[in-house]
Image (cartoon, rainbow, N blue to C red):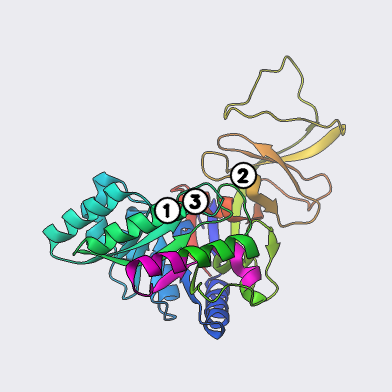
Amino acid sequence: MTYPRLLIDKETVLANAAALQSMGAQQHIHITPVVKALAGYDELIRDIAALGFSRIGDSSLLHIRNYADISAEKWLLRSPMVCEIPQLLALTDGALISEERLLRELEAEAKQQGKEYKVILMAELGDLREGCDQQELIRLSVVAESLPHVHLEGIGANLSCYGNILPGQQNMAAMAAMTAAVEEALGRKLAVVSGGNSSSLKMLASGQLPAAVNDLRCGESILLGMIPCYDVPAAWLQQGAFTVETEIIEIKTKPSLPWGESGSCDSFGGSTSFEDKGLRKRALAALGKQEIYINSLTPLDRGVELLGGSSNYLVCDITEGPDYQVGDIIAFSCDYAALATGMCSQYLEKSCR
């Protein structure tokens, strides 16, 4: 057995994907699985696609290359760089766009490759990541409609990822209004109106999404069974699909307060406060900030506290935990940040169970 490793309960992930697919179908809303946190782990991605989703979303062409042969459409769920557009058209079927130059670069490359390429134009609803106001959205829609090798599939919006703005009646009504304005300008209906991500699941579950919205891009809910921004588990989904395990490499009883003159920050530019609890039994585990986002790890064994870490160490208080020995395995659950960084890390072995 090789450690550290990230264990994946594949059946839990697939059950979540199927549950969301069914919930969406009941309200005529397509669910686009977002697999960017899996970092191209194609064994699981292929099984998700096999459930019958028409689109799969990712944020990296390097990841998509691992499963480019699946039958579902592959969508890049970020605006592409100009330098990667030739590769983009070779590997994907569509992308999210918010700039006219990118539309024209796509047109030129699609013409050269002799194909049609799909786009979703992104609207700004207040989260302040990518997206256009209504006036620019209409203008870009007209531009896209004029390009013979670019097909405007629809419009979309992002919420909760940057500005932590929740989906609600007001911004979803704005999304519906933008949809109507674009459709009026084009004189046709849009095939896709993508109204957000997993943070919209509360509105989906309560039937509050406007009729105009017919697609949601869901990653964290499928992988972790969580509703982001609210940071709560979805009662109708399963949690605990991903577990991080590593070996304990030192156990010592030490003071809980460091001593000596303190510097301004640690090796990663952060600072840590310490509480004086006297002498405590501590374990060092072979995993650190260079391999995974450690603040998103939670020890699974009762009585274990993750105190922090450095580049390659986790520091845990095990005074009230199990009677660990050096060489024993310590396990952690992970939230989205730990999952996304851990899956991208070559230092963690990955395996399905």
Tell which of 283 and 13 is nearer to you.
Answer: 13
Dot 1 alpha-carbon crowd within 10 angstroms: few under 14, some 14 to 19, many 20 or more: few
Question: Residue 238: x and y, percent?
Answer: 64, 72
| Residue 229 is a magenta residue | no
| Residue 202 is a magenta residue | yes
Reading the image, the residue beneath label 1 is: 135
Give the residue at x 34% y 60%: 141
Whether label 3 touches label 1, CB < 8 Å: no
Reading the image, the residue beneath label 2 is: 294
Which residue range is magenta in the image? 179-203
SS label for mark 1: helix
Reading the image, the residue beneath label 3 is: 348
Q: Is residue 36 left or right of residue 301?
A: left
Q: Give the residue type that dot 1 points to.
A: Gln
Of discs 2 and 1, which sits in the foreground? 1
Tell which of 207 and 185 is nearer to you.
Answer: 185
Q: CA distance from mark 2 to mark 3?
A: 13 Å
Q: Earlier in the sequence, mark 2 or mark 3?
A: 2
Q: CA distance from mark 2 to mark 1?
A: 43 Å
Question: Residue 119: x and y, percent?
Answer: 33, 62
Q: Give the residue type that dot 2 points to.
A: Ile
Q: Is residue 284 left or right of residue 88?
A: right
Is any part of residue 97 visible from this angle? yes
Give the residue at x 72% y 14%: 261
SS label for mark 2: helix
Is any part of residue 217 visible from this angle? no
Give the residue at x 43% y 48%: 346
